[in-house]
Image: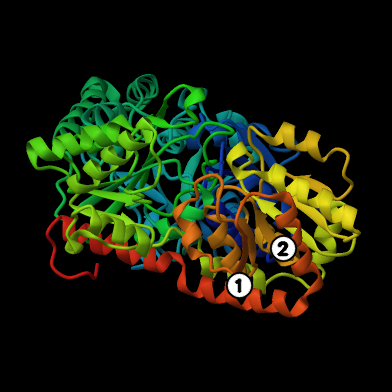
Amino acid sequence: MIRRRVSTVIACHNRRDLTLRCLESLEVAARQAPGLAVETILVDDGSTDGTAAAVAERFPAVRIVTADGSLWWAGAMALGLRACSPEFDFQLWLNDDVVLRPDALARLVETHDRRVREHGRPLIVVGSVLSTEDGSVTFGGGRRNGVHPLRSVRLPVDDLPQDCELVNGNVLLVPREAALRLGGIDPVFAGVQSMADTDYGLRALALGIDPVVAPGWSGHCDRDTRPPPWRDADLSLLARLRAVTGPRGRPWRAWFVFARRHGGPLWPVWWAAPLVKGVVAALVPDSRTDRRVLLVEGVVPDYRLGLMRELAKSTDPRFVVYHGDGQAGLTAAGSAAALPIASHRGRNIFWPRFCGGRFAWAAGSTAALGGRFDAVCVGLHTHDLGVWAICLARRLTGRPKVMISGHFALSEPGSCLLGMVRRRLRGFLARCADAVLPYTEEGARECQTAGIPATRIFTCVNSVDVEQARAALAALPATVVDAVRRRHGLPDGPVFLFVGRLYPAKRVDAAIAAMSVLADRGVGASLLVIGSGVDEGRLRTLAAELGTVRFGSAEFDPEALAALFNLATAVVVPGSVGLVAAHAAAHGVPLIACRAGTPHGPEFAYLDDGENCLLTDAVDSVAIAAAMERLAKDPDLLSRLRRGAWRTGDRLGVGRAADAYVTAARHAIGLAGTAS
């Protein structure tokens, strides 16, 4: 039997889970159409959430074409259509958020074949897709309505094929003859989200190619409920005005060509009217009755995604995140995944690099001053001019209410002039806030000592997603330890782990020196250093003579981190202890750290010597080696510390932090109660 070839084209951008679900449904539909040979071309337009890698792993037969994020839907689809095999019999346009019904592909081809037999005319076949909420038709075919040549009424589902005039490209079957005559998507629509499919259908109609809606429905696809960007009150006026002619709006050239091509004699009217309406809408955006809280995050690393996911559940107030890129080697790396919360990407401005990657003006600070948010949450950063500007606006105008989160080390010892000035500035900022969110109980006590009323203090924990980490641990295969050992070239025996950014304050050099001490004592153990940063070159040089130290690139994936922690006897951080304390506790792994030396983060308070960690008094390689040797040789001690670390993890987690944020926000903006 000769199988006809169907080339399926899908465009995607940062919708990994939806894309995988779409491909799964396509795979099922292809199996139910044995007379068809289906190839799939996925155009990944600059996704940063790992879509391409996930698709390559789950669907190795899919041909992936990558782009830089500038194509948007129309440009990405045009690129994919050009990549189709030249021998195709049909092209199938498919949106990445469509879930096909199992018989969809067979029904579309059957509709085409029957129509050709009955009428003998070329056609393109549109599939109707339904909302998962109410079963209404969300996308499909439509007919012109009234005098406006570009306005249509969407056709309902019917048991018979229906002629239409305007088409959506969510599910669209294009036979070879029609595809060759139409010549693909007009390049003028590259960089545009919409219009291209409507233009395609109207051009088909003009060439005598019938757009036909297939009987029944072809799958599910929900509407995008986001407001158009020119009506989004979270954006600045300038951003809204730009959005009118942006990729999701009506870009000047593409809209001019579209309106002139299909608008008839009055095309200038139809061209101008939506632009005028868009500008008016931008000037008076959608009013909102919900309260909104802006989180000025600067950079959102992977560990913050769990907190973002929890905060997204709050509806009153509603949280919106502004974030941007960090500085390589100096700040935490921003997550490559799409944020699970309403968010906007902006530009972070930094002080010169010798200042250590400190923010001068964090992304979102300007938006915070625009008066569109009821409250703004910033970090306790005296070096960030945006924080000072927001607090000044609060003093002068009463808006926005200010929430400040952070360490709140308001009485750290030290006599240098810079340290004294910094402490005074921190105290001043903290007292200006309507609500403070210290990471620890110690920080809360510092706030009270500084004169901040207890009613304005909401203790949260700076933690990782403990539930996610433990789920990843539980899902690890039994062979994972051996696999990690082989990948990093580690021999049998205890493995001590450092994971984090590599910069001098972490004192990884002391851990490497401790490995030399262990080697002299004849203790067989390895040190695995996972991370990157400005100190990496120096550390590799120090470890070059030792055969017991291995390096690996930074890891952020929960499964990969779970495998590393599962391998580790203990985590070793001789210098500044930060979030790694929460990471270790989440995975039930004890820590070896030092009390003195470089200043620690607030997470150091999670450590309890002899309960979940071993602490040395100073950053001393001999003392660190002694602690490592104790854990390597005393399984009872190691087991006790592991249990203690696990109990510590039970007290952490993003749920508690999210509750504190919501409660603090409701207090700051004067809402009764704590539930959202």
Residue under the image location 85 percent in, 64 percent down: 482
Residue 462: percent from the left, percent from the top?
A: 43, 58
In the rendered structure, find residue 484 and report the number of the disc placed on it.
none
Q: Position of residue 413 (x, y in %)?
A: 39, 46
Q: Is residue 244 left or right of residue 548?
A: left
State whether residue 89 appears in this view: no
| Residue at x-position 62% and y-position 37% | 504
The residue where tag 1 is placed is: 610
| Tag count | 2
- The circle on residue 627 is 2
- Asked whether residue 334 is in view, the answer is yes
Which percent across, then down, holds residue 676? 24, 67
Q: Quadrant of the N terminus?
A: bottom right
Height in image: 31 above or below 65? below
Give the structural element (helix, strand or loop) at label 2.
Answer: helix
Picture quadrant of residue 506: top right
